[in-house]
Amino acid sequence: MAALIEQPVLMVGAGWKDYGLVDSGHGRKLERYGPHCFVRPEPQAMWSPRLSEWQADGEFVPGSDEDGGGRWQFDRPVPRDGWSLEWNEVRFTAQCTPFRHLGFFPDMAPVWDWMRERLSGKPDAETLNMFGYTGVGSLALSGCGTVAHVDASKKSVAQARENAALSQMEDRPIRWLVDDAAKFAAREVRRERRYDGIILDPPKFGRGPNGETWRIEEGLAPLVADCRRLLDADSRFLFLTVYAVRMSSLALGGLLAELFADLPGSIEHGDLAVREEGEGGRLLPTAIFARWANPG
């Protein structure tokens, strides 16, 4: 049945028209988001920058503690309400958020491609996007069938719906759900629901819509166990990403290997990375992942 492939895998994203990793180094990265460039902290960029000077519209300056905080400093005018970007057929709003992000995670682009490949030839697929944020992944998957988009933040789900309208995908079969991910998964298990694919992108720490506390070290294993119960031998994938946690991708792979032992397919683990633009562009790691795939 599903076997763990011990050799790590790299999933590398490259820039596109509306996004690019321009340079990185000395604990920072310079990125292009459409017409604007920004500098953000990146502890894994331990090397020296390739460029002698960075030109940016703004920079996120982190707080003094490692658990968050900080503020944006701008050198040029940036639209406070955001600006429109595209990834393939999906349009969405980028915006400088208080959490240092810009409204989407560009390193997920190769993951969106991978999931759509897994669902190819299955136009009636049902997928579940847990911690779906602003919906770019849900919109990317909605061309393959129905999608349940779950996030605890009303603001994020509202932004996801706005992105659907911006993409002219309001009529796509997407359920927009403001809910606690763990509670939603447990209810779906009781309802005996099944999905063809599940994407999990949990934060290190978070709160549900009713004040529920999420800590990845405590909640991840039971959540993945419930997600396993929502999949069967005809399902196609589960994709799990983890950011900013002192954990190995091999640990994530081991968790999936235990829970998916009775299903066909294979389990892989490794790093997500983005390649710098230009000749000799280096790979900047961004997250670890584990994935179960069933060729069907």
Image (tube, grey):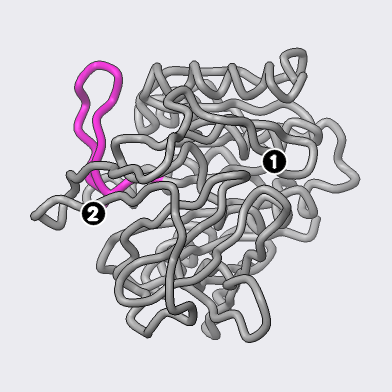
> Percent position (x, y) of residue 8?
53, 81
Is 159 on the left-hand or right-hand side of 112? left
Say which quarter of the image contains residue 192: top right
Q: Please check the rendered image and state whether residue 13 is part of the magenta-colored stretch, yes or no.
A: no
Is 126 on the left-hand or right-hand side of 4? right
Q: Residue lying at the far top in this picture: please name it.
A: 171
> Percent position (x, y) of residue 198?
58, 43
Q: Looking at the image, which residue is at 39% across and 57% down? A: 39
Tag shown at residue 196: 1
Query: In the rendered image, which quarter contains the C terminus?
Result: bottom right
For this rendering, which residue is in front, 256 or 86?
A: 86
Q: Residue lying at the far right in this picture: please name it.
A: 121
Q: Say if 117 sits above or below 212 in the image.
A: below
Of the image marks 2 and 1, the number of the one nearer the N terminus: 1
Provide the residue designation for mark 2.
217
SS class of the residue under badge 2?
A: helix
In the image, the segment drawn in magenta is: 202-216
Q: Looking at the image, which residue is at 27% across and 49% down? A: 204
> Percent position (x, y) of residue 125?
77, 35
